[in-house]
Amino acid sequence: MEVTNDNGCSWVNDLIPRTNIKSLQSNEDCEWLIIGAGYTGLSAARKLGQLYPNQKIILVDAQLAGEGASSRNSGYLVDTTLNDGFTSNKELNNYKKKADIYELGIKFVKNFINEYQVDCDWNECGKYFASSKKSDQTILTNFSDTLSKLGFEHNILSSNDLSKRLGTSFYNIALHTKGGILLHPGKLVRAMIDVLPNNIFLYENSCLLDWSKVKDKISCNFKNAKINTNKIIFATNGFLKSLGIKSNYNFPITLTASMTRSLTDEEFKSIGEPKEWGVLPVRPMGATIRMTKDRRILIRNTAEVHDPAKMSKKDLDTRSINQKIGIKKRFPQLPDNIIQSSWSGIVSRTRNSSQIFEKIDKNIFAAGCYNGSGIGVGTLFGEQIAIKASNENTKEIETIEARNKPTWLPPQPFLNLGIKTRLIYERLRARSEI
Ligand SMILES: Cc1cc2nc3c(=O)[nH]c(=O)nc-3n(C[C@H](O)[C@H](O)[C@H](O)COP(=O)(O)OP(=O)(O)OC[C@H]3O[C@@H](n4cnc5c(N)ncnc54)[C@H](O)[C@@H]3O)c2cc1C
């Protein structure tokens, strides 16, 4: 499967285009090969580069590094989640294990930006879980109970407070968590590319087509060449399944998002000049919506089973119209034509929303499946899978490995049928929140 993406992502288009892009043109032999250059693969490469300055380490990506989901997300670095996939977080012990991983994720991203002095529009403003339905108070009260038991600072807000803070009277109830960071995902992942150690060979626009293990070597076929490696780390997240990695445990989901241009002074005044904020939905299929620090509005209100390799322009336009309606519902005073770009991105999910972090076979490792928490958890898992692949242990690996493991999925066509039915059901339940 060849991976291609639309080039409409505002986060990517904010950045200066990179130069000196190399793609794989001749056969290579290496000690380490990492497939996928998003947060996970780049963090694994950075760690391996530090651990093994004298070994040959290759990192490949099917498209430009960092320009998959790592640039295409909504930019919430989360400390807590309400809907992780479709799992409600009822079981306290399991929720705590997840939150421990999120906490480490935040710490690792923070360490990274401090060490390399990265400007990625970091804002520790927390986040809202908001709904237009007053009846969702029950969900938020239960969630508040879970957060209190685990010591997360938060408060519940009603419509008056919300309209002042968000500049929209759409929402009637919300829970604000003090923890959680908003950032520019494109700037963060670009910094990870810029600081790759010198001993990492990065090949882009080079798609792994298939791979096999022959004795102790792993042989990888690309369009124009082959790579033989001693050790391999799969960091392709939404594309793990297409490479045969833990196929019965993960599946890709396509998300689409749109971003407006910056609001003019007048438009910004008309919504009350709110500070930067981020809203996550109370219901799984509701919209994620964010006001950026430069007054742009981002909306993500789809999650679907779709060909992960490509979304056509026509399909993207249909979704973009829905996103325009989503913005209009919340900000009726703004003009109709302010969406500047729309894009799709692929995430990976497991049945019980648990992540993949493991040795698949001797010298073969994989990390992924973070759903909406990949900024922090991907950065953490990337570094730690490199350490695990070096046969070392850390207390972070122990925390990661204490989580519930992904559970088995039914085969096709039952799998897609089940996912599609669930997505339609959840979309219906959240229809007012889209
Ligand atoms: C619209 C959207 C909103 C999101 N919002 C958030 C959010 O607010 N907060 C959050 O934490 N997470 C969010 N996520 C999820 C987050 O983006 C991912 O969890 C994260 O990017 C995973 O990082 P990764 O490096 O594992 O995978 P990716 O960023 O997907 O990188 C994998 C790379 O592998 C490459 N690849 C795939 N197949 C091959 C192949 N055969 N050969 C070579 N290379 C290959 C791809 O080109 C890609 O660059 C969102 C995602 C989307 C799409």
Image (cartoon, helix red, strand yellow):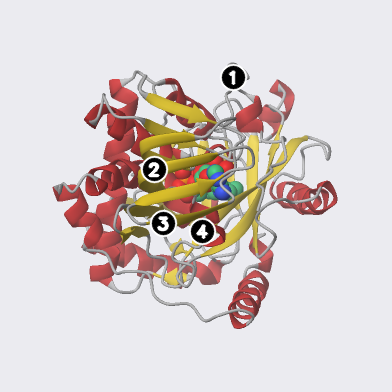
For label 1, the SS is loop
Name the residue at 27% across, 68% down.
Answer: 94
- Mark nearest the camera among 3 and 1 is 3
User: Above or below — where is 423 with respect to 103?
Assistant: below
Say whether marks 3 and 2 touch (CB < 8 Å): no
Q: Which residue is mark 2?
A: 229
Say whether marks 2 and 1 touch (CB < 8 Å): no
Q: Which residue is mark 3?
A: 213
For label 4, the SS is strand
Q: Amino acid at mark 1?
A: Arg
Q: Amino acid at mark 2?
A: Thr
- Mark nearest the camera among 2 and 4 is 2
Whole-Å distance between the Cαs marked 2 and 1? 28 Å
* Near-viewer residue (48 or 173): 48
Q: Residues within 10 Å of mark 3 (few under 14, many from 20)?
A: some
Name the residue at 67% across, 74% down.
Answer: 424
* Near-viewer residue (45 or 218): 218
Q: Earlier in the sequence, mark 2 or mark 4?
A: 2
Q: Residues within 10 Å of mark 1 (few under 14, many from 20)?
A: few
For label 3, the SS is strand
- Residue 335 seen by the camera: yes
Whole-Å distance between the Cαs marked 4 and 3? 25 Å
Q: x and y percent of residue 28 in the render?
A: 47, 34
Disc 4 C-beta below 8 A from ligand 1: yes
Q: Which residue is mark 4?
A: 348
Q: Amino acid at mark 4?
A: Ser
Whole-Å distance between the Cαs marked 3 and 2? 10 Å
